[in-house]
Amino acid sequence: MGDDHVSVRGVPTGLFIGGSWRSSTSGATFAVRDPSTGDVLAEVADATPEDGITALDAAVAAQQEWAATAPRQRSDVLRRAFDLVRAHEDDLAALMTLEMGKPLAEARGEVVYGGEFLRWFSEEAVRIGGDYRTNPEGTGRAIVLKRPVGPVYAITPWNFPLAMATRKIGPALAAGCTVVVKPAELTPLTTLFLVELFRRAGLPDGVLNVVPSLDAKGLSEPIIADRRLRKLTFTGSTPVGSALLKQAADNVLKTSMELGGNAPLLVFDDADLDAAVDAAMLAKFRNVGEACTAANRFFVQEGIADAFVAALTAKVDALRIGRGTEDGTTMGPLIDDRAVDKAAGLVDDAVARGARLITGGQRVERPGSYFAPTVLDEVQPGSEILTTEIFGPVVSITRFATEDEGIRLANDTEFGLIAYAFTTDFPRGQRLAERLETGMLGLNTGVVSNAAFPFGGVKSSGLGREGSHEGIEEYLETVYVLTPDP
Ligand code: ADP
């Protein structure tokens, strides 16, 4: 790519199977668009179901040899890929801004965050251990060892085009698994470029394969039904995750599911107001709210509510809407017009049910898919916005009186990915950690994502964890060998 950050020259647009770039067997391609203008950025090969199985063939053929490589060799490839990702920070950031819309500064942040999964798992690759145990009766010894689960199919979403790929590819490769990736059809270019970096890092042929496709279901079903596949890892919406789990059940596949969220953000009367507002801005407006970790339901205690709403609204009104490539932009477009319509519909429903519209509330009239950053106060029970993942720049505030009421409201959802809470009372923080139904809690902080810590949800938000030492376990099987007494 060029230095002007607006060219996608040099980014591969084919399928990557068995170590080489190729066209779809149908010859078909599909368009990838810039959501800030609607312009076509590139035409990408549209994999057929037959191409999907060819990619699985390649992953299966490479599996045994990759599993048998020295851990240090897998570690070195991942480390070189990490170095290449960091060396191409500008290119990767520009690419994400172009195909997804986030401001360049945020895209750079994702290169660092997403790259970290490669460094972290390059370090984990050489720490896969086992142990030696004694039977409680004293007779009999067991050796417990770890083995790669086998070929992996990874399906990723469009909102974090780099990080969602690296946090699956990193641990899979470290564990000794080969991979077929299907990137989101809205943002395949970042993954294609990432895979090219892996090729340059010396990854053996067939270990990592990429099949972009417009027909996610048609491509995925035969791969998931194929008995040679051993693991399915998915990040996306709960309905799709649930349908994939049903398919995975037929062959009892090992699965990891990072699904939807409906994150509560609790602000207590004793919170540090300025710190809470700054963190809340990140929790809500990072990635234009297009994150499963985005704060979806704000619950603010009555004593601090007026001050919080005023301070937050001032910051919201100061956001600068624009193309992610423009200097000074702090909020880019939504991914497409459907996302704009969804945000508008949720705001209209909340207002019709009695919420107060403090600021924003409508589409921004300019080319591209923009929605004005919005604050709603006194959102009423029964409003759709309380049960729907907004995935847009809309703050929904409900006021509460007591800690018990706040916790009850926060837990009143089928989801449990992340919660945020702002309080200076440490024992209260501990009570929240024990009582909130969530996989993650940001206590006085608005961003928790970190390659070194276990990311994942409870309830309908998913199964399994990504990142940290837990992350590699998702790609390992445990084998136990009983041995006689020495
Ligand atoms: P979102 O609503 O955020 O786009 P989705 O769950 O629809 O989330 O998409 C996440 C990923 O899942 C994308 O790569 C998409 O192509 C893929 N996907 C969507 N539907 C299916 C399906 N039925 N089978 C397999 N993959 C799917």
Image (cartoon, rainbow, N blue to C red):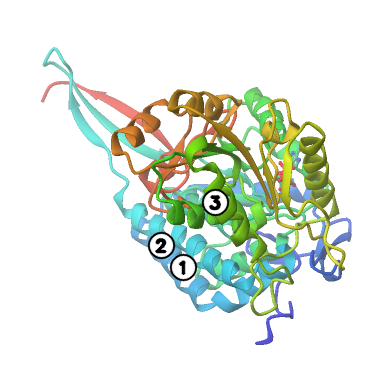
Q: Nearer the viewer, mark 3 or mark 2?
A: 3
Q: Which residue is mark 1?
A: 82
Q: Which residue is mark 3?
A: 283
Residue 257's quadrant in the figure? top right
Residue 385's quadrant in the figure? top right
What distance separates the C-alpha of mark 3 from that of mark 2?
25 Å
Residue 130's quadrant in the figure? top left
| Residue shown at 65% from the left, 49% from the top | 156
Q: Which residue is mark 2?
A: 119
Discs 1, 2 touching: Cβ within 8 Å? yes
Q: Is residue 93 among the parts visible in the rendering?
A: yes
Q: Nearer the viewer, mark 3 or mark 1?
A: 3
Tell me the kind of residue under disc 3: Ala
Residue 314 in percent (x, y) is at: 61, 60
How many numbered markers are drawn? 3
What distance separates the C-alpha of mark 3 from that of mark 1?
27 Å
| Residue shown at 69% from the left, 76% from the top | 325
Residue 121 in percent (x, y) is at: 40, 55
> How crowded is the residue under tag 3: few (<14 C-alpha within 10 Å), some, or many (20+)?
many
Question: What secondary structure is found at the residue carrying circle 3?
Answer: helix
Discs 3, 1 touching: Cβ within 8 Å? no
| Cβ of mark 1 under 8 A from ligand 1 | no
What distance separates the C-alpha of mark 1 from that of mark 2?
6 Å
Camera-nearest residue between 367 and 482: 367
Residue 219 in percent (x, y) is at: 78, 44
Above or below: residue 132 compared with residue 64: above
Camera-nearest residue between 334 and 10: 334
Which labelled disc corresponds to residue 436?
Answer: none
| Residue shown at 46% from the left, 51% from the top | 276
